[in-house]
Image (cartoon, helix red, strand yellow):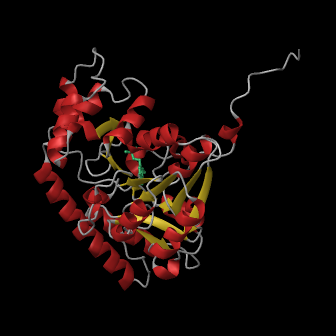
Amino acid sequence: MSLHASPSPRPAIFATASVPHGAITPAELERLGLKAEQVLDFSVNINPYGPPPGVREALLAAPIARYPDPEALALRRALAHHLDQPVSRILVGNGASELIWLTALAFLEAGDRILIAAPTYGEYARAARIMAAHVIEWRAFPQADFAMDPEAFLGLIKAHAPKIIFLCHPNNPTGQPVPLAALARGADEHPHSLFVVDEAYLPFAPTVRSALTLDRPNILVLRSVTKAYALAGLRLGYAVGPEPLVAALKRMQPPWSVNVMAQAAGLAALGQSRWLQNTLTRLQHNARNLMHTLRDMGRCPHPSATHYALLPVGDASRVRAALLRQGIVVRDATSFGLPHYIRIAARTPAENARLIHALTQLPSDL
Ligand SMILES: Cc1ncc(COP(=O)(O)O)c(C=O)c1O
């Protein structure tokens, strides 16, 4: 036996690299000699007015010496009330991220196919590839403002019979909603396919209707509590859908993955619906103003149903680096296959003014 023999992980785990996300890591800040307080982050799509009142007090009172409720019953009851859904149709998770991974674990076998509508959130493909599934991609065009072409997409479902269709509604990074009529048709025509609709950003898009309203046996909706309530550090999300689907995800979930602080914060945050409404209305207003100002400057952000949008630039990676030197973080969209775009999310009016100023300071070739 070789002295260097070592246990081999499953080959599928090497089939996919990690997915870049927004925000700036402490390691990158350290490399640049910056402190977190010195940068303003437009690269994450989080409510800049949060977290809501009452959350910090709830965190202090959380019984951290005890195990969390593995059923998260109090939080699921509050969500059930909030969503007007039975408790049995809800599973809470450690962020929407965990629920994406649980879906892949519960439903995918090696050789299965999944379908995504690119450019989109990278974790759907990553979770699928780790299960040794194949990823089929339909790609939206900038010329159509990245809107989904329902006929082309439904055609791919018919041709490939994917086990899972992952849809982001509204989409990250484009802000485009999924046409719900096409989703309903797809779900009805393909009862053996699971349609996972990630609504992490739905609260930021007041004109967009939830896929929950379709109520089909093969549609599972995922939501995030980390964006609209600004609780990204606590990790909280939930899945809502038909009981057998939710139960399958629950079977794959590690015990206690939603800790007592996240459960307590979620309960406190759900009680703040007026705060949520007020802050999201302000944010939509800020986003509209930001996009108008960008257009007045001759820039061309793509239309978006949300408070974030794709902005065409020369070289996204150079633009990000140049803005960082001014203390501004934007999302370089290269990992979405868009090396000439950055994604920016609106913040408060004063902060948006800083972004605009920083853009005016860019070298002319950017
Ligand atoms: C579309 C989408 N879904 C899910 C997530 C993850 O959300 P959470 O923080 O709830 O895990 C993100 C985070 O960026 C996202 O962009």
- Placement of 234 over or under 196, stated as above or below: above
Q: Nearer the viewer, residue 18 or 191?
A: 191
Q: Decide if residue 101 is in sight here.
A: yes
Please give left or right for residue 227 compared with residue 280 in the image: right
Q: Position of residue 340 (x, y in %)?
A: 57, 71
Q: Decide if residue 361 is in sight here.
A: no
Q: Position of residue 187 (x, y in %)?
A: 40, 60
Q: Position of residue 59 (x, y in %)?
A: 22, 29
- Placement of 287 over or under 259, stated as above or below: below
Please give left or right for residue 9 compared with residue 60 in the image: right
Q: Quadrant of the N terminus?
A: top right
**Image point (71%, 37%), residue name:** 11
**Image point (68%, 45%), residue name:** 15
**Image point (34%, 30%), residue name:** 258
- Placement of 291 over or under 262, stated as above or below: below
For residue 108, which quarter of the picture?
top right
Q: Nearer the viewer, residue 143 or 328?
A: 143
Q: Position of residue 230 (x, y in %)?
A: 29, 47
For residue 96, which quarter of the picture?
top left
Q: Nearer the viewer, residue 162 or 306?
A: 162
- Placement of 209 over or under 238, stated as above or below: below
Q: Quadrant of the C terminus?
A: bottom right
Q: Residue furthest left?
A: 274
